[in-house]
Image (spheres, rainbow, N blue to C red):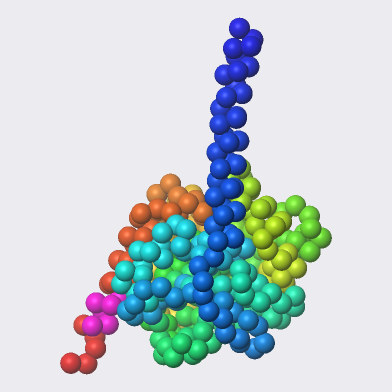
């Protein structure tokens, strides 16, 4: 009997371990296997981007410690959106195949500048914008700084962070210091919201893989130290003229920040993905559906308000 009980306990653990190995293996392949793209330079930094589909331009900005393919292509968002739009996916500086400066002053609102420079490089006057997590905060800052160039912004797993929250930025400084020392860290999103639970083993495994093998920790630390530069004051938020579509999972630690943004931005709508966390929201059909619905609604509004 003890042997039977022991085996019964070991099999589920072995199954979970095997599943984690398979997922990590798939992630490894997807990280290394990049879609061919193009590069351009902005303020001395090489920036990589990829374009797929045709139609109105839609610029996508990925999250922290990943890259354009991993954030948008792997969950199927690129494929769906490229059926109607000219989808432009940028590797943010510090990530992927783009340059990786080590100075905090090379990040912050320069991330916004890179996005606008890419539009200039492609001869695009204005575009739709999509941002996931870190990319959502960049997209929000871009909407405040360049409202005439942003037709509408879809933010997934992102919200509003009060720039006066000293405890938040102190925690980010600690996170950056741990990155620089090579110390173990919690996922960045753990510092960006009211976390109700610890990240699961899959999330932790992917996070450690990305930070330990496929990213330059010094570059990411410099970026983290610049995040205060991306925040908006409440007054700036209430003056926003760009329409925002905020999509967030009900188990995402940034749910509180997403609700705070929706309550303050004049033209914001909030869409919840039931049961999804910060990572899995990207893979949900509901996320793809809401993304397309928001863009379609804004296009209809533009058509109805355009001069005849």
Q: Report x, y in % for residue 169.
A: 69, 67
Q: Is residue 232 visible?
A: no
**Residue 300 colored in magenta in the image:** yes
Q: Can you say which quadrant of the picture contains the C terminus?
A: bottom left
Residue 206 placement, left or right of 136: right
Front position in the image: 118 or 276? 118
Q: Residue furthest top?
A: 1
**Quarter of the figure with the N terminus:** top right
Q: Quadrant of residue 79?
A: bottom left
Find residue 102 and report its horizontal and vertical position in percent. 75, 75
Dominant SS of magenta comes to helix
* Residue 44 in which image quadrant: bottom right
Q: What residue is at 42 percent from the left and 88 percent from the top?
A: 124
**Does residue 177 lie above or below 237 as drawn?**
above
Q: Position of residue 52 (x, y in %)?
A: 41, 73
* Of 239 and 38, the residue lying toward us: 38
Q: Quadrant of residue 66?
A: bottom right
Residue plotted at (69% across, 74% down): 100
Residue located 61% across and 23% down the image? 10
Q: How many marks?
A: 0
* Residue 187 located left or right of residue 36: right
Using the rendered image of the protein, determine whether residue 49 is visible from the camera's viewpoint: yes
The residue drawn where x is 24% and y is 88% is: 306
Tell me which segment is drawn in magenta.
298-303
Which residue appears farthest toward the left when viewing the image? 308
Coordinates of residue 288 in the picture (x, y in percent): 36, 60
78 in the magenta segment:
no
Near-viewer residue (176 or 254): 176
């Amino acid at each position: 009997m003890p042997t039977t009980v022991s085996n019964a306990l070991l099999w589920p653990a072995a199954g979970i371990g095997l599943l984690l190995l398979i997922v990590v293996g798939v992630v490894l392949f997807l990280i290394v296997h990049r879609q061919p793209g193009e590069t351009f330079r902005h303020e001395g930094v090489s920036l990589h981007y990829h374009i797929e589909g045709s139609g109105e331009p839609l610029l996508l900005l990925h999250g922290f410690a990943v890259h354009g393919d991993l954030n948008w292509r792997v969950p199927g968002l690129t494929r769906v959106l490229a059926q109607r739009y000219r989808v432009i996916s940028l590797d943010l500086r510090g990530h992927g195949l783009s340059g990786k400066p080590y100075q905090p002053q090379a990040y912050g609102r320069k991330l916004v500048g890179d996005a606008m420079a890419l539009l200039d490089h492609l001869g695009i006057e204005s575009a739709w914008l999509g941002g996931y997590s870190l990319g959502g905060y960049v997209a929000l800052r871009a909407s405040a700084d360049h409202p005439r160039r942003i037709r509408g912004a879809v933010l997934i797993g992102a919200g509003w962070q009060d720039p006066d929250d000293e405890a938040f930025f102190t925690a980010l400084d600690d996170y950056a210091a741990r990155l620089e020392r090579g110390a173990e860290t919690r996922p960045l999103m753990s510092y960006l919201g009211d976390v109700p639970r610890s990240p699961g083993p899959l999330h932790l495994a992917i996070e450690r893989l990305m930070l330990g093998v496929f990213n330059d920790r010094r570059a990411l630390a410099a970026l983290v130290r610049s995040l205060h530069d991306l925040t908006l004051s409440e007054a700036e938020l209430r003056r926003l003229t760009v329409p925002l579509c905020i999509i967030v999972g009900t188990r995402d630690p940034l749910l509180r920040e997403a609700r705070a943004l929706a309550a303050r931005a004049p033209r914001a709508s909030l869409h919840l993905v039931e049961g999804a966390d910060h990572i899995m929201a990207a893979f949900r059909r509901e996320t793809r559906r809401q993304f397309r619905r928001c863009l379609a609604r804004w296009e209809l509004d533009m058509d109805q308000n355009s001069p005849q």
